C-alpha cells in the first residue's frame, strides 16, 4: 500500500532556533563551570530585542548577555539592518529555582524535576536509525547554512526552512514526492536563487530520492526578504517536532532546550531514544517507541510502555523485561549513564537532538547484551 509522510526542519537562524541556541548556550556556560547547575531558561527574540528569563541556580559566574551576543553572532546575525543582531537590546530576567521544586530534586534519592511523559523512537529505515523524511529535511537546512557560510550561494541569510515528503510502499521508502525549501535572502534575482538552491542544496542532499515526478518548491511566495526574529518573533521550545522525530515518533509535549538534565523532559527523552535505538540495533524490532512517565519528586518512573508497531522479533513481555533489566530509569542513573552533566547541549540546538553521531544517547553499546539475553530466555527475568 502506498502512503506518504512529511517532515520539516528549520535552519539555526530561524527565530525559534535562535532562542533554543541561546538557552542551550547559557546552560552549557553554567555546566562548564558548575556541573550541578540547575537551569531552566527561556528566550524570546523579536525586532531589535531579546529577553532571557527563567530560573538558574549555579556557582558559575556567567555573563548571560555576552553568552547570548556571542551565540547570535555565531549564527550569523551581525548586521543591525536585518532588524535583529548581536547589537540588539538584551534584557535578562533570571532568578533562583523554586525551593518547592528543588526539594524533590535534592532528596537523598533524586526525584524527577517535574511530572510528565517522554518518548523515544528508532527505526531501521536509515543508517542513523531515524525516519528518512526528517533526516533529509535536516540535511537540507544544514546544507543551506553551509552554502551561506561558505559563500557558495551569495545573498542568502540565516533564516530558512525545509520540508520533505517521502512516498512509501509498506514500510519501505521509495522516492521523494515533494521537497520544499524557503530561505531568507537579500533582494535578488529569484530565478537565479532558485536555480542555485536546486543545484547546490537540493540535488546534492536528495540524490537518487528525486525523480521526474518529484514536486520541488523553492521560495514559493517569490519573496523572503524580511526574516529572522525581526519578522517573526521566536521563543524557546516551539520546534519540538523538528527537535525529535519529525512527527513519526510521538512527543510528550515538553521542550528540551534550556533545561538541565534534572528536568526529565530532556534527560528521559534522551534515555528513551537510547533504549529504542539499542532495541533496533539489536535486531529485536524494526521500529521501536518507548514511553516513560514520571511524578515530580519521585525517583522511579510510574509507567514504561514499549511499542514496536508489529515489527518486534521477540514477545512483547520478554522485550519489556529486557528493557527494565538493562536500563536504570531513575533520573540520577540516567544522568550518570549518559554523562548529562557535561556542557554538550549547544550541539543539539539546531538540526535535531537525535541521529547525531557522538551524542551519548546515540550509542548502541547495549545492543549485543540485549541480543544475547533475548536468545537466552532464562536470562530475561528482571
Image: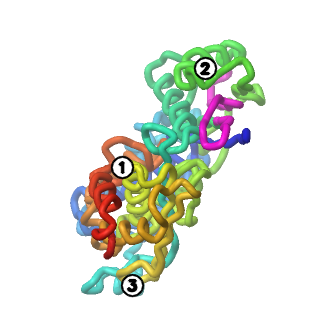
| SS at badge 2 | helix
Q: Earlier in the sequence, mark 3 or mark 2?
A: 2
What is the number of the mark on residue 197?
A: 2
Looking at the figure, which quarter contains the N terminus? top right
* Cα distance in 3D space between marks 1 and 2: 31 Å
Whether residue 166 is in magenta: the answer is: yes
What label sits on residue 7 in the rendered view?
none
Do the CB atoms of the residues marked 1 and 2 lie less than 8 Å apart?
Answer: no
Q: Residue at x 57, y 36 (%)?
A: 137
Q: Which sits earlier in the primary sequence, circle 1 or circle 3? A: 3
Q: So how many labels did they put on this image?
A: 3
**Alpha-carbon distance for marks 3 and 2?**
51 Å
Q: Is residue 51 visible?
A: no
Seen at 73% across and 39% down, the residue is 2
Q: Residues within 10 Å of mark 3 (few under 14, many from 20)?
A: many
Q: Nearer the viewer, mark 1 or mark 2?
A: 1
Q: Report the residue at 67% width, 20% height from top.
A: 211
Q: Residues within 10 Å of mark 2 (few under 14, many from 20)?
A: many
Q: Which residues are magenta?
A: 164-187
What mark, if any, has residue 362 been given in the picture? 1
Which residue is disc 3 drawn over?
298
144 or 13: nearer the viewer: 144
Q: Nearer the viewer, residue 91 or 338?
A: 338
Q: Nearer the viewer, mark 3 or mark 2?
A: 3
Residue 285 rendering spot, x and y as whole percentages: 47, 53
Which structural element holds mark 1?
helix
Looking at marks 1 and 2 on the same chain, the residue that comes earlier in the sequence is marked by 2
Amino acid at each position: 500500500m502506498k502512503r506518504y509522510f512529511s517532515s520539516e526542519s528549520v535552519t539555526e537562524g530561524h527565530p525559534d532556533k535562535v532562542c533554543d541556541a541561546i538557552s542551550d548556550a547559557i546552560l552549557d556556560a553554567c555546566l562548564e563551570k558548575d556541573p550541578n547547575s540547575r537551569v531552566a531558561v527561556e528566550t524570546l527574540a523579536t525586532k531589535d530585542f531579546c529577553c532571557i528569563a527563567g530560573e538558574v541556580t549555579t556557582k558559575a559566574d556567567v555573563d548571560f548577555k555576552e553568552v547570548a551576543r556571542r551565540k547570535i553572532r555565531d549564527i550569523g546575525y551581525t548586521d543591525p539592518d536585518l532588524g535583529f543582531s548581536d547589537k540588539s537590546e538584551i534584557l535578562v530576567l533570571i532568578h533562583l529555582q523554586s525551593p518547592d521544586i528543588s526539594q524533590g530534586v535534592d532528596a537523598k534519592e533524586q526525584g524527577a524535576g517535574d511530572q510528565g511523559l517522554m518518548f523515544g523512537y528508532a527505526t531501521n529505515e536509515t543508517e542513523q536509525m531515524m525516519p528518512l523524511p526528517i533526516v533529509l529535511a535536516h540535511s537540507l537546512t544544514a546544507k543551506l547554512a553551509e552554502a551561506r557560510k561558505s559563500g557558495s550561494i551569495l545573498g542568502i541569510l540565516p533564516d530558512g526552512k525545509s520540508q520533505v515528503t517521502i512516498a512509501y510502499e509498506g514500510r519501505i521508502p521509495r522516492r521523494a514526492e515533494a521537497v520544499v525549501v524557503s530561505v531568507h535572502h537579500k533582494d535578488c534575482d529569484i530565478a537565479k536563487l532558485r536555480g542555485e538552491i536546486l543545484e547546490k542544496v537540493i540535488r546534492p542532499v536528495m540524490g537518487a530520492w528525486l525523480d521526474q515526478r518529484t514536486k520541488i518548491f523553492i521560495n514559493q511566495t517569490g519573496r523572503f526578504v524580511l526574516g529572522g526574529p525581526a519578522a517573526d518573533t521566536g521563543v524557546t521550545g516551539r520546534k519540538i517536532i523538528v527537535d525529535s522525530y519529525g512527527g513519526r515518533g510521538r512527543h510528550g509535549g515538553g521542550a528540551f532546550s534550556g533545561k538541565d538534565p534534572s528536568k526529565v523532559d530532556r534527560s528521559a527523552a534522551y534515555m528513551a531514544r537510547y533504549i529504542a535505538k539499542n532495541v533496533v540495533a539489536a535486531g529485536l524490532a524494526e521500529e521501536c517507541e518507548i514511553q516513560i512517565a514520571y511524578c515530580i519528586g519521585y525517583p522511579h518512573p510510574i509507567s514504561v510502555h514499549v511499542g514496536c508497531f508489529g515489527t518486534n522479533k521477540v514477545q512483547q513481555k520478554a522485550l519489556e523485561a529486557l528493557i527494565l533489566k538493562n536500563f536504570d530509569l531513575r533520573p540520577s542513573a540516567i544522568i550518570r549513564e549518559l554523562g548529562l552533566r557535561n556542557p554538550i547541549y549547544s550541539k543539539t540546538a539546531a538540526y535535531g537532538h537525535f541521529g547525531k553521531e557522538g551524542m551519548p544517547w546515540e550509542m548502541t553499546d547495549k545492543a549485543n547484551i540485549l541480543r544475547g539475553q533475548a536468545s537466552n530466555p532464562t536470562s530475561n527475568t528482571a
